[in-house]
Image (spheres, rainbow, N blue to C red):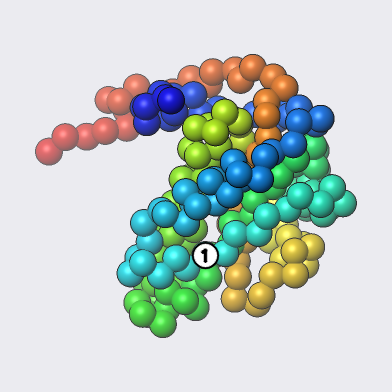
Amino acid sequence: MWDFFETVRHRHSIRKYQTDTPVEAEKLNAILETACAAPSAGDLQAYHITVVRNEQIRKQLAEAASRQQFIAEAPVVLVFSAEPVRSAEHFGERGANIYALQDTTIAATYAQLAVVAAGMASTWVGDFDEQRVREILGLEADQIPLSILSIGYPAEVAELSPRRHLDEIVSWR
């Protein structure tokens, strides 16, 4: 089993998936449990995760996401939606405007790392028509889709993308 640092280093966006290899239910469940173990403001878990295995719905999501076809080709897609009303009940405007978004993206990040730990790959998609995704998934009015995560076994080797040097990102005081 990889340690945490290797898991992070091996996380790369993959846009080609093995279409004949399904994601095992136990691995998917472990990924979802890991996402739900993520920290959240007040332990409210102000988010909702929609699991999409249905091919027709994945195709619709791909169209809603600027026609990014790899979404349709991935055997599983997770859509992470914020629930700002849930945070607002405890934390007011800051909860609605910030905490729910943070909670949702932290959960999606945990899921993305769990995918790597499970021997698979993913791509985080943020470029999509929010209203169309709401309609496709039948989301509640208070659920805001923030990220689409395509998941599957990779059918390509990821190209390493350049990273900024720490000195450009980190400051010390």
Most extreme residue toward the left is 173
Residue type, mark 1 in image: Tyr
Can residue 148 be seen here? The reply is no
The local crowd at label 1, few if under 14, some if 14 to 19, many if 20 or more residues have their Cα within 10 Å, is many
Front-lying residue, 166 or 27: 27
Residue at image point 75% right, 64% down = 137
Judged left or right of residue 159, residue 18 is right
Q: Quadrant of the C terminus?
A: top left
Q: Which residue is mark 1?
A: 47
Can residue 30 be seen here? The reply is yes
Most extreme residue toward the front is 26
**x and y percentages locating residue 26 in the rendered image:** 60, 44
Most extreme residue toward the bottom is 89
- Name the element at disc 1: strand
Judged left or right of residue 3, residue 72 is right
**x and y percentages locating residue 139 in the rendered image:** 69, 70
Q: Quadrant of the N terminus?
A: top left
Residue at image point 41% right, 53% down = 38
In the image, residue 136 above or below residue 94: above
**Tally of marks:** 1
In the image, residue 160 above or below residue 83: above
Residue at image point 61% right, 31% down = 121
Residue at image point 73% right, 60% down = 133
**x and y percentages locating residue 99 in the rendered image:** 40, 65
Front-lying residue, 40 or 135: 40
| Residue 130, quarter of picture | bottom right
**x and y percentages locating residue 87 in the rendered image:** 42, 74
